[in-house]
Amino acid sequence: MVGFTTFELYDRIWDDRLISVIYSGDTIVHHEHWGQQTLAFAWIRFIGELKRAVPLKPIYWFLIVKGHRTYKYLPAFTKSFYPHWSIDRSDLKPLLDFLAEDKFGEFYDRNSGIIAYERSRGHLKSDFVLPLKNETMKPSVQFFLERNPKYGEGDELACICDFDDTNLRPFTKRMLQSYSTEKTA
């Protein structure tokens, strides 16, 4: 195994509507396989299958991020999300606060959006904490480092995006549509 992600699928009532929430935490890919997209494609396939199963139900991705590399999945898949370095999606913040407080209670700080435990419940290996030199100029990486300065100690940034078709990157949208219309054998 060279990579994995953990996730939980559950429903919540939000704004008088039933929504699907995909909560994901740890996402690890062995450094020799960075850039390989097998895990990303499997994730998109899962979302496509979910959209096929519940086509009218809104789907939200509630992602907690302890490293800048995982944070980059949000702009890879979607056009906008919260928190974002240049697009205001503060409309998603109340839902994020609701989900994060529900799951993490007092460990979630709604002002900073950070989940911080008294003692680390896991953190990145020291060899992989700092971004590579070419990554430090990317707005997404700069933003993540500003918003989660103690990520190296295990603090996690709570994030959220919606998987509405209008919010998907073109490639993601095409893949989701192909997976969501596949016939099961």
Image (tube, rainbow, N blue to C red):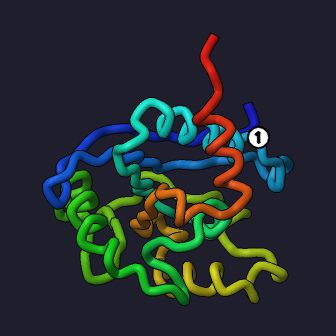
Task: State the quadrant of the C terminus.
Answer: top right
Q: Residues within 10 Å of mark 1 (few under 14, many from 20)?
A: few
Can you say whether 16 is above or below 153 in the image?
A: above
The spot of residue 58 in percent (x, y) is 36, 51
Please count the marks in the image: 1
The spot of residue 83 in percent (x, y) is 44, 77
Q: Which residue is mark 1?
A: 38
Rendered residue at 27%/41% (across/down): 11
The spot of residue 103 in percent (x, y) is 25, 52
Q: Secondary structure at mark 1?
A: helix
Q: Is 17 or 29 nearer to us in this picture?
A: 17
| Residue 69 visible, this orientation | no
Task: State the quadrant of the N terminus.
Answer: top right
Q: Amino acid at mark 1?
A: Thr
Q: Quadrant of residue 138?
A: bottom right
The spot of residue 73 in percent (x, y) is 63, 61
127 sits left or right of 10 in the view: right
152 sits left or right of 11 in the view: right
Q: Residue furthest top?
A: 185
185 sits left or right of 17 in the view: right
Q: Residue furthest left?
A: 16
Q: Quadrant of residue 97?
A: bottom left
Can you say whether 111 is above or below 167 in the image?
A: below
Rendered residue at 41%/46% (across/down): 22
Rendered residue at 56%/85% (across/down): 143
Can you say whether 99 is above or below 108 in the image?
A: above
| Residue 178 visible, this orientation | yes
